[in-house]
Image: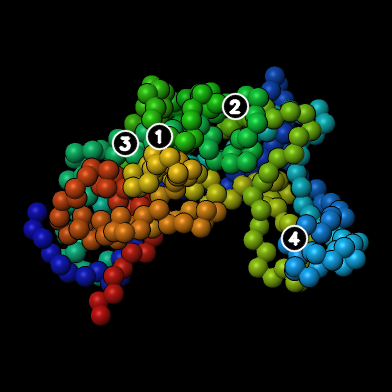
Amino acid sequence: MAKDKSVASVLAFEKKLVPSDGYMYGTTWENRSVETPLRLIEKSVRGTISNRLKEAVKNDPAKLNAEVEKANLQRVDSCALEQHQDTLHLHFTLKVLGGIHKPSACNSSAFQQTYVEAVKDYIDRERFAELGRRYALNIANARYLWRNRVGVEALEVIVKSSKDDKIWTFDAKSFSIRTMECMDKQVAALGESIAQALASEDDFLMLDINCFAKIGNAQEVYPSEELVLDKGKGNKSKVLYAVNEIAAMHSQKIGNALRSIDTWYPEFGDETNDAGAIAIEPYGAVTNMGKAFRANKHDFYTFFDKFARGEKLERIEDEHYVMAVLVRGGVFGESDK
Protein backbone atom coordinates (compact mmCIF):
# COMPACT_ATOMS: atom_id res chain seq x y z
CA MET A 1 0.00 0.00 0.00
CA ALA A 2 1.44 3.33 -1.00
CA LYS A 3 1.59 5.98 1.66
CA ASP A 4 -0.02 9.31 0.88
CA LYS A 5 -0.06 12.42 3.05
CA SER A 6 -2.91 14.16 1.21
CA VAL A 7 -5.37 15.97 3.42
CA ALA A 8 -9.13 15.42 3.23
CA SER A 9 -10.55 18.64 4.64
CA VAL A 10 -14.07 17.42 3.92
CA LEU A 11 -14.58 13.91 5.23
CA ALA A 12 -17.78 12.40 6.59
CA PHE A 13 -19.21 8.94 7.22
CA GLU A 14 -22.82 7.91 7.68
CA LYS A 15 -23.61 5.71 10.69
CA LYS A 16 -23.98 2.02 9.93
CA LEU A 17 -25.95 1.02 13.04
CA VAL A 18 -29.31 2.80 12.84
CA PRO A 19 -31.66 2.09 15.78
CA SER A 20 -35.21 3.36 16.02
CA ASP A 21 -36.68 4.91 19.14
CA GLY A 22 -37.59 2.32 21.74
CA TYR A 23 -41.30 2.10 22.62
CA MET A 24 -42.43 1.00 26.09
CA TYR A 25 -45.36 -1.25 26.93
CA GLY A 26 -46.66 -2.83 30.09
CA THR A 27 -47.55 -6.53 30.25
CA THR A 28 -47.22 -9.62 32.46
CA TRP A 29 -44.41 -12.15 32.32
CA GLU A 30 -46.82 -15.08 31.95
CA ASN A 31 -49.12 -13.54 29.31
CA ARG A 32 -47.24 -11.17 27.01
CA SER A 33 -49.93 -11.19 24.33
CA VAL A 34 -51.90 -8.70 26.42
CA GLU A 35 -50.10 -5.39 26.75
CA THR A 36 -50.81 -1.67 26.89
CA PRO A 37 -48.68 1.33 25.82
CA LEU A 38 -47.14 3.08 28.78
CA ARG A 39 -48.22 6.70 29.25
CA LEU A 40 -46.46 9.52 31.04
CA ILE A 41 -47.98 10.70 34.30
CA GLU A 42 -47.63 14.28 35.51
CA LYS A 43 -47.06 14.75 39.23
CA SER A 44 -46.89 17.85 41.40
CA VAL A 45 -44.73 17.31 44.46
CA ARG A 46 -43.43 19.34 47.39
CA GLY A 47 -39.76 18.59 47.76
CA THR A 48 -37.24 19.63 50.40
CA ILE A 49 -34.22 21.88 50.10
CA SER A 50 -31.29 19.49 49.64
CA ASN A 51 -28.73 21.45 47.62
CA ARG A 52 -25.47 22.74 49.08
CA LEU A 53 -25.94 25.97 51.01
CA LYS A 54 -23.53 28.79 51.73
CA GLU A 55 -21.46 28.43 54.89
CA ALA A 56 -23.19 31.41 56.52
CA VAL A 57 -26.58 29.76 56.07
CA LYS A 58 -25.49 26.21 56.83
CA ASN A 59 -23.84 27.14 60.15
CA ASP A 60 -26.65 29.38 61.41
CA PRO A 61 -29.60 27.31 62.76
CA ALA A 62 -32.08 30.16 62.36
CA LYS A 63 -31.11 30.82 58.73
CA LEU A 64 -31.03 27.10 57.99
CA ASN A 65 -34.53 26.61 59.42
CA ALA A 66 -35.81 29.54 57.37
CA GLU A 67 -34.29 28.06 54.21
CA VAL A 68 -35.72 24.60 54.91
CA GLU A 69 -39.19 26.04 55.42
CA LYS A 70 -39.28 27.29 51.83
CA ALA A 71 -41.46 25.10 49.65
CA ASN A 72 -39.58 23.32 46.84
CA LEU A 73 -42.56 22.83 44.54
CA GLN A 74 -41.97 20.71 41.43
CA ARG A 75 -43.99 19.45 38.52
CA VAL A 76 -42.45 16.30 37.01
CA ASP A 77 -43.18 13.53 34.53
CA SER A 78 -43.11 9.92 35.69
CA CYS A 79 -44.01 6.53 34.21
CA ALA A 80 -44.99 3.21 35.77
CA LEU A 81 -46.56 -0.13 34.99
CA GLU A 82 -50.24 -0.59 35.75
CA GLN A 83 -51.19 -2.22 39.04
CA HIS A 84 -51.68 -5.70 37.53
CA GLN A 85 -48.58 -5.55 35.30
CA ASP A 86 -45.15 -6.84 36.32
CA THR A 87 -43.19 -6.67 33.03
CA LEU A 88 -41.77 -3.88 30.90
CA HIS A 89 -41.70 -4.55 27.14
CA LEU A 90 -39.24 -2.42 25.15
CA HIS A 91 -39.50 -2.70 21.36
CA PHE A 92 -37.21 -1.18 18.73
CA THR A 93 -35.69 -2.01 15.36
CA LEU A 94 -32.07 -1.89 14.27
CA LYS A 95 -30.85 -1.49 10.70
CA VAL A 96 -27.26 -2.55 9.96
CA LEU A 97 -25.81 -1.04 6.78
CA GLY A 98 -22.87 -1.95 4.55
CA GLY A 99 -20.80 0.34 2.36
CA ILE A 100 -18.29 1.46 4.97
CA HIS A 101 -15.57 1.62 2.30
CA LYS A 102 -17.29 4.69 0.79
CA PRO A 103 -17.21 7.97 2.73
CA SER A 104 -20.40 9.98 2.30
CA ALA A 105 -18.20 13.01 1.56
CA CYS A 106 -14.48 13.23 0.74
CA ASN A 107 -12.74 16.01 -1.22
CA SER A 108 -9.41 14.21 -1.73
CA SER A 109 -9.28 11.42 -4.29
CA ALA A 110 -5.74 10.46 -3.20
CA PHE A 111 -6.84 10.14 0.45
CA GLN A 112 -9.95 8.19 -0.52
CA GLN A 113 -7.87 5.72 -2.53
CA THR A 114 -5.59 4.84 0.39
CA TYR A 115 -8.58 4.75 2.74
CA VAL A 116 -10.48 2.30 0.51
CA GLU A 117 -7.41 0.05 0.26
CA ALA A 118 -7.00 0.05 4.05
CA VAL A 119 -10.65 -0.81 4.68
CA LYS A 120 -10.68 -3.58 2.08
CA ASP A 121 -7.57 -5.06 3.67
CA TYR A 122 -9.27 -4.99 7.10
CA ILE A 123 -12.46 -6.59 5.75
CA ASP A 124 -10.49 -9.29 3.91
CA ARG A 125 -8.65 -10.18 7.12
CA GLU A 126 -11.24 -9.62 9.84
CA ARG A 127 -14.67 -9.65 8.10
CA PHE A 128 -15.99 -7.49 10.98
CA ALA A 129 -16.22 -10.67 13.08
CA GLU A 130 -15.08 -9.10 16.35
CA LEU A 131 -17.23 -5.98 16.04
CA GLY A 132 -20.26 -8.02 14.96
CA ARG A 133 -19.92 -10.28 17.99
CA ARG A 134 -19.65 -7.31 20.35
CA TYR A 135 -22.67 -5.53 18.91
CA ALA A 136 -24.60 -8.82 19.17
CA LEU A 137 -23.59 -9.19 22.81
CA ASN A 138 -24.94 -5.72 23.62
CA ILE A 139 -28.22 -6.69 21.99
CA ALA A 140 -28.34 -9.93 23.98
CA ASN A 141 -27.44 -8.40 27.36
CA ALA A 142 -30.11 -5.65 27.15
CA ARG A 143 -27.64 -2.91 28.02
CA TYR A 144 -30.00 -0.47 26.26
CA LEU A 145 -32.48 -0.74 29.15
CA TRP A 146 -30.06 1.42 31.16
CA ARG A 147 -31.62 2.13 34.58
CA ASN A 148 -34.54 -0.20 33.82
CA ARG A 149 -32.10 -3.13 33.88
CA VAL A 150 -31.25 -2.70 37.57
CA GLY A 151 -32.97 -5.10 39.96
CA VAL A 152 -34.95 -7.11 37.39
CA GLU A 153 -36.25 -10.55 38.37
CA ALA A 154 -36.03 -11.94 34.83
CA LEU A 155 -34.86 -10.54 31.51
CA GLU A 156 -35.43 -11.93 28.04
CA VAL A 157 -34.47 -10.58 24.61
CA ILE A 158 -36.01 -11.86 21.36
CA VAL A 159 -34.36 -10.83 18.08
CA LYS A 160 -35.86 -11.48 14.66
CA SER A 161 -34.15 -10.92 11.31
CA SER A 162 -36.44 -9.66 8.57
CA LYS A 163 -34.12 -11.02 5.87
CA ASP A 164 -34.37 -14.74 6.61
CA ASP A 165 -36.82 -14.87 9.56
CA LYS A 166 -34.12 -16.16 11.91
CA ILE A 167 -35.02 -15.78 15.58
CA TRP A 168 -32.62 -15.62 18.51
CA THR A 169 -33.77 -15.74 22.15
CA PHE A 170 -31.46 -14.69 24.99
CA ASP A 171 -31.56 -14.84 28.79
CA ALA A 172 -30.09 -11.36 29.14
CA LYS A 173 -29.28 -11.74 32.86
CA SER A 174 -26.75 -14.46 32.00
CA PHE A 175 -24.55 -11.93 30.16
CA SER A 176 -22.33 -9.32 31.77
CA ILE A 177 -22.39 -5.66 30.72
CA ARG A 178 -18.93 -5.11 32.23
CA THR A 179 -16.93 -7.13 29.73
CA MET A 180 -17.07 -8.19 26.10
CA GLU A 181 -15.96 -11.76 26.75
CA CYS A 182 -18.62 -14.21 25.62
CA MET A 183 -18.59 -17.70 24.07
CA ASP A 184 -22.36 -18.10 23.59
CA LYS A 185 -23.23 -19.75 20.25
CA GLN A 186 -26.38 -17.70 19.68
CA VAL A 187 -24.47 -14.46 20.26
CA ALA A 188 -21.87 -15.69 17.76
CA ALA A 189 -24.58 -16.49 15.19
CA LEU A 190 -26.24 -13.08 15.56
CA GLY A 191 -22.82 -11.44 15.43
CA GLU A 192 -22.03 -13.23 12.18
CA SER A 193 -25.21 -11.86 10.57
CA ILE A 194 -24.32 -8.33 11.71
CA ALA A 195 -20.74 -8.72 10.50
CA GLN A 196 -21.87 -9.89 7.06
CA ALA A 197 -24.00 -6.77 6.63
CA LEU A 198 -21.21 -4.43 7.80
CA ALA A 199 -18.67 -6.08 5.49
CA SER A 200 -20.93 -5.85 2.44
CA GLU A 201 -20.75 -3.12 -0.19
CA ASP A 202 -24.43 -2.23 -0.30
CA ASP A 203 -26.38 -4.86 1.66
CA PHE A 204 -28.26 -4.36 4.93
CA LEU A 205 -29.77 -6.27 7.83
CA MET A 206 -32.98 -5.31 9.65
CA LEU A 207 -33.46 -6.63 13.17
CA ASP A 208 -36.68 -6.49 15.21
CA ILE A 209 -35.82 -6.48 18.92
CA ASN A 210 -38.18 -7.13 21.81
CA CYS A 211 -36.95 -7.00 25.39
CA PHE A 212 -39.03 -8.17 28.36
CA ALA A 213 -37.96 -7.16 31.87
CA LYS A 214 -39.85 -8.50 34.88
CA ILE A 215 -39.53 -5.60 37.32
CA GLY A 216 -42.53 -6.11 39.64
CA ASN A 217 -46.17 -5.03 39.80
CA ALA A 218 -46.81 -1.31 39.30
CA GLN A 219 -43.10 -0.50 39.45
CA GLU A 220 -41.74 2.73 38.02
CA VAL A 221 -40.01 2.61 34.63
CA TYR A 222 -37.58 5.11 33.14
CA PRO A 223 -38.04 6.46 29.61
CA SER A 224 -35.48 8.92 28.24
CA GLU A 225 -35.43 12.33 29.87
CA GLU A 226 -35.67 15.35 27.59
CA LEU A 227 -33.04 18.05 27.73
CA VAL A 228 -34.86 21.26 28.66
CA LEU A 229 -32.70 24.02 27.23
CA ASP A 230 -34.67 26.95 28.67
CA LYS A 231 -35.73 25.82 32.13
CA GLY A 232 -36.86 29.31 33.07
CA LYS A 233 -39.78 29.15 30.66
CA GLY A 234 -40.82 25.55 31.29
CA ASN A 235 -43.42 24.50 33.85
CA LYS A 236 -41.78 21.13 34.61
CA SER A 237 -38.49 20.32 36.27
CA LYS A 238 -38.38 16.88 34.58
CA VAL A 239 -39.76 16.13 31.12
CA LEU A 240 -39.78 12.54 29.88
CA TYR A 241 -39.79 11.41 26.24
CA ALA A 242 -42.90 10.09 24.51
CA VAL A 243 -43.89 9.45 20.89
CA ASN A 244 -47.62 9.63 20.07
CA GLU A 245 -48.25 9.50 23.82
CA ILE A 246 -46.24 6.26 24.20
CA ALA A 247 -43.33 6.43 26.65
CA ALA A 248 -40.10 5.90 24.75
CA MET A 249 -36.32 5.88 24.77
CA HIS A 250 -34.27 8.05 22.42
CA SER A 251 -32.68 6.23 19.49
CA GLN A 252 -29.43 8.00 20.47
CA LYS A 253 -29.54 6.41 23.93
CA ILE A 254 -30.13 2.97 22.46
CA GLY A 255 -27.32 3.56 19.95
CA ASN A 256 -24.94 4.58 22.72
CA ALA A 257 -25.63 1.31 24.52
CA LEU A 258 -25.15 -0.80 21.39
CA ARG A 259 -21.77 0.77 20.64
CA SER A 260 -20.49 0.43 24.21
CA ILE A 261 -17.89 -2.10 23.09
CA ASP A 262 -14.61 -0.29 23.71
CA THR A 263 -12.47 -2.39 26.05
CA TRP A 264 -9.33 -1.54 24.08
CA TYR A 265 -8.57 1.78 25.81
CA PRO A 266 -5.44 1.84 28.03
CA GLU A 267 -7.17 2.01 31.43
CA PHE A 268 -9.54 -0.92 30.89
CA GLY A 269 -8.92 -3.58 33.52
CA ASP A 270 -7.22 -1.11 35.88
CA GLU A 271 -8.36 -1.67 39.48
CA THR A 272 -9.03 2.05 39.90
CA ASN A 273 -11.17 2.25 36.76
CA ASP A 274 -14.88 1.54 37.20
CA ALA A 275 -15.97 2.42 33.65
CA GLY A 276 -15.91 -1.06 32.12
CA ALA A 277 -16.77 -1.22 28.41
CA ILE A 278 -17.31 2.35 27.18
CA ALA A 279 -19.12 3.71 24.15
CA ILE A 280 -17.13 4.10 20.94
CA GLU A 281 -16.14 7.79 20.78
CA PRO A 282 -13.21 9.59 19.07
CA TYR A 283 -11.71 10.59 22.43
CA GLY A 284 -13.28 7.90 24.62
CA ALA A 285 -15.54 10.46 26.29
CA VAL A 286 -17.71 9.33 29.20
CA THR A 287 -19.72 12.42 30.08
CA ASN A 288 -21.23 11.20 33.36
CA MET A 289 -17.69 10.60 34.64
CA GLY A 290 -16.29 13.79 33.12
CA LYS A 291 -13.38 11.94 31.55
CA ALA A 292 -11.86 11.19 28.15
CA PHE A 293 -10.32 7.71 28.33
CA ARG A 294 -8.45 7.98 25.04
CA ALA A 295 -6.03 10.83 25.69
CA ASN A 296 -2.27 10.73 25.05
CA LYS A 297 -2.34 9.65 21.41
CA HIS A 298 -4.80 6.80 21.87
CA ASP A 299 -7.61 8.77 20.22
CA PHE A 300 -9.34 8.00 16.93
CA TYR A 301 -7.66 10.74 14.90
CA THR A 302 -4.14 9.60 15.82
CA PHE A 303 -4.92 6.06 14.67
CA PHE A 304 -7.11 6.98 11.70
CA ASP A 305 -4.59 9.34 10.11
CA LYS A 306 -2.12 6.44 9.97
CA PHE A 307 -4.61 3.71 9.09
CA ALA A 308 -6.35 5.60 6.27
CA ARG A 309 -3.05 6.56 4.65
CA GLY A 310 -1.83 2.99 4.43
CA GLU A 311 0.32 2.74 7.58
CA LYS A 312 0.03 -0.34 9.76
CA LEU A 313 -1.18 0.11 13.32
CA GLU A 314 0.70 -1.68 16.10
CA ARG A 315 -2.30 -3.62 17.44
CA ILE A 316 -5.28 -5.25 15.77
CA GLU A 317 -7.36 -3.83 18.65
CA ASP A 318 -6.56 -0.33 17.39
CA GLU A 319 -7.86 -1.30 13.95
CA HIS A 320 -11.06 -2.64 15.52
CA TYR A 321 -11.46 0.67 17.36
CA VAL A 322 -10.93 2.75 14.20
CA MET A 323 -13.48 0.72 12.27
CA ALA A 324 -15.97 0.94 15.14
CA VAL A 325 -15.75 4.75 15.09
CA LEU A 326 -16.41 4.68 11.34
CA VAL A 327 -19.45 2.46 11.99
CA ARG A 328 -20.57 5.12 14.49
CA GLY A 329 -20.21 7.76 11.77
CA GLY A 330 -19.29 11.41 12.00
CA VAL A 331 -17.43 14.30 10.39
CA PHE A 332 -13.66 13.76 10.51
CA GLY A 333 -12.16 16.27 8.09
CA GLU A 334 -8.69 17.67 8.73
CA SER A 335 -7.88 21.33 8.27
CA ASP A 336 -5.81 21.92 5.14
CA LYS A 337 -4.34 25.16 6.46
Q: Which of the two labelled residues, at mark 2 and mark 1, occupies the earlier sequence position?
A: 2
User: Which numbered mark, 1 or 3, is in the foreground of this view?
Assistant: 1
User: Is residue 171 among what the camera can see?
Assistant: yes
Q: Which mark is residue 155?
A: 2
Query: Which class describes the residues within 10 Å of circle 3: few (<14), some (14-19), or many (20+)?
Result: some
Q: Which of the two labelled residues, at mark 2 and mark 3, occupies the earlier sequence position?
A: 3
Q: Can you say whether 43 is above or below 334 in the image?
A: above
User: Is residue 120 among what the camera can see?
Assistant: no
* Residue farthest bottom in this picture: 337
Q: What amino acid type is highlighted by mark number 2?
A: Leu
**Residue at x-position 46% and y-position 56%:** 291
The residue that disc 3 covers is 130
Instruction: Determine whether the residue tagged by mark 3 lies in a helix, strand or loop.
Output: helix
The CA span between labels 2 and 3 is: 25 Å
Q: What amino acid type is highlighted by mark number 1?
A: Met
Q: What amino acid type is highlighted by mark number 4?
A: Asn
The CA span between labels 2 and 4 is: 36 Å
Q: Which of the two labelled residues, at mark 4 and mark 1, occupies the earlier sequence position?
A: 4
Query: Which class describes the residues within 10 Å of circle 1: few (<14), some (14-19), or many (20+)?
Result: many
Q: Which of the two labelled residues, at mark 2 and mark 4, occupies the earlier sequence position?
A: 4
**Residue at x-position 64% and y-position 38%:** 148
Which color scheme did the rendering employ for the protein? rainbow
Q: Is residue 180 left or right of residue 59?
A: left
User: Mark 4 and 3 residues: CB-CB less than 8 Å, in contact?
Assistant: no
Q: What amino acid type is highlighted by mark number 3?
A: Glu
Across and down, in percent, residue 52 comes to 73, 62
The CA span between labels 2 and 1 is: 19 Å
**Residue in the foreground of this view, choosing between 34 and 237:** 237
The residue that disc 1 covers is 180
Q: Which of the two labelled residues, at mark 1 and mark 3, occupies the earlier sequence position?
A: 3
Instruction: Determine whether the residue tagged by mark 1 lies in a helix, strand or loop.
Output: loop
Q: Quadrant of residue 36?
A: top right
